[in-house]
Image (spheres, rainbow, N blue to C red):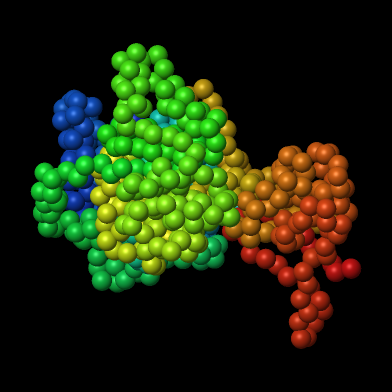
Amino acid sequence: MGASLDKVGVVGLGTMGAGIAEVLARSGLDVVGIEVGDEALKRGRGHLESSTGRAVKRGKLSAEEQQAILDRIELSTSFGALSDCDLVVEAVPEQLALKRRVFEQLDEVCRADAVLATNTSSLSVTEIAVSTNRPEQIVGVHFFNPAPVMKLVEIIHTVLTRPEALAVVQDLVERLGKVGVTIGDRAGFIANRLLFGYLNQAAAMYDSGHATREDIDAAMKATGLPMGPLTLMDLIGLDVSLEVCEAIYRETRDRRHAPAPILRQFVTAGLLGRKTGRGFYSYDEPAAATATAEAGTVEPPPQVGVVGSGPLAVALIRGCLRAGAHVRFVAGDTEKARAVATALEQSVAGDTEKAQAVSTALEQSVEGGTELALLAECDLIIEAVAEDTSVKRSLFAAVDDVAKPGAILATTATTVPVIELAAATDRPKDVIGLHLPDPEGELTEIATTVVTATEVARRATEYVTALGKHPVRCRDRAGFIVDALRVPYLNDAVRMLESGYARRRSDRRRDAVRLRVPDRSDRRPGPDRPGPRGGGAARPLHRAPRARVRALRTAGGAVHRGPYFPLSTGSSRTTQPPEDRRVPYDAGPLRTGSSRTAPTPAYRRDRCGPIRPVRSRSPYPERHESAQEPP
């Protein structure tokens, strides 16, 4: 195998392949670009010229540097041009049969010591590798679009990949100035497995009518993302999104990756996103004029009542004051009411001008006390008390008695269904949910129940807008929009970390995901060796976080890194328990104080044959079930 790289081939010069070729040429490498025909080759040359041309216009490249880059790229329609390449990167469409045919041809024409790499984003690198006579020299190298800009590159090894072949690709990625992460061959790898669970759930949310496409995208952009999930899917291509989801679902059977029905319908209809002019959004028609005509008649801020004295209540009051609204707040007692006023004054401590303005506003626009009667004239009453269902229900019943007819009652509950609180009143049609993912931010999610009146939802939207917030509407479902999409995404990352597939490391320059090549010497667990990192029985992916919480509660705050944790015995020990005191994660719910010991594995008796263990499916096969025989 060559000790250094001088010439690299790229098969496929679409958007992705041309980007990879550009990155390679920018680093000083000679590049051979291959396409299936003259028309495709012409398009590939156009991609290269337009991409480098944009860089010249932005001042990133000089005209001389652009020409030097283009001169280093040789274009051809013959695979024979790759015969003297040290490395060849395949970047054809995401179809397994097509990729296998390409690799069969590469195997015939490339040097025996050449490394072959696939840019697949979701397909099995192993399945591609076995189509050649050199599977040990096949590596996955997943660039992200646009390749000249995106720094992350996933480097994928199979169970057959030689360390020398892997090192060639790792050295190349470092030479290109990219951030490489080396991982095993799992569908979706890291980025796409996390990303497409989030994107697919957003598509399902839109398909179910939970929220509009505009509100879904606006909600997620308000959290700091550059674009919403549905816009991103249109940019990626709905056909690509469908293929990635299907590939991950085939391997994991995780329903978060089971393609949303609307995604399959769009692809069947040929609506693939930006590249066809229509997907979740239409890109052929000129953007419709926004309804800014109504902005000339700005509604005055409503009179707002806030019940509560915690940080959320203070943030709500402060936001209403900024919008010029008159606020009345009710706290649990006089001391808490005084604490709210103090917190409002302290929020501008050090700024004399603001402090004077707030002091004047507190005198003129804020009334506080401990009696709910203060809320009698409020247009919008917001509950911001502790997340306790019984407390909230009692409060809503009491507020119902004092609020004027037509007042909107809102809850900031995040774990209690809005309909439960609405049912505690005699006016359930006037009750909505108001969720602020960031109390100091502009985004406000308005959750309507099955009985919320249409007029109430409309007025609530107007009130929130008048208070300087950005309203998005959704149904009364757990997580609303932001948390329903964001929390499972973060949860998937934790499960991936806990499974041992990936681990997090930090350095002075960045926090990045670093992955380790698994030690395969102990892949096969047995009675005396529970497996890698503690091994043990594989558990369903969705059970991991709950098991971690149970472990934390049971062990008095200590969480073991392996998949076992001690039973609660009143001891605060944090050491790993002996074998006979371990309980697997998938052993079912644990209750503090339970006296049961480790249960026996689940067994199934076939109609014919011996009793054998039931083997559960794990999306991360690094963990194997114990092969113990039944007692």
Classify residue 602 as left or right of residue 520: right
Q: Quadrant of residue 107?
A: bottom left
Q: Quadrant of the C terminus?
A: bottom right
In depth, the one of 157 and 186 nearer the eye is: 186
Percent coordinates x, y for residue 485 in the rendering: 44, 52
Residue 286: image location, x then y, percent: 10, 54
How far across and down, in percent of the image, does residue 365 sit?
A: 32, 32
Residue plotted at (16% across, 27% down): 63
Q: Is residue 28 visible?
A: no
Toward which corner of the image does residue 610 lie, by quadrant? Answer: bottom right
Residue found at x 49% / y 61%? 424
432 or 589: nearer the viewer:
432
Residue under the image location 17 percent in, 56 percent down: 283
Side of 323 relative to 314 (left or right): left
Farthest bottom residue in view:
607
Measured along the vertical axis of the image, is residue 41 above or below residue 265? above
622 left or right of 277 in image: right
Residue at position x 55%, y 36% from top? 333
Above or below, 166 against 237 in this view is above
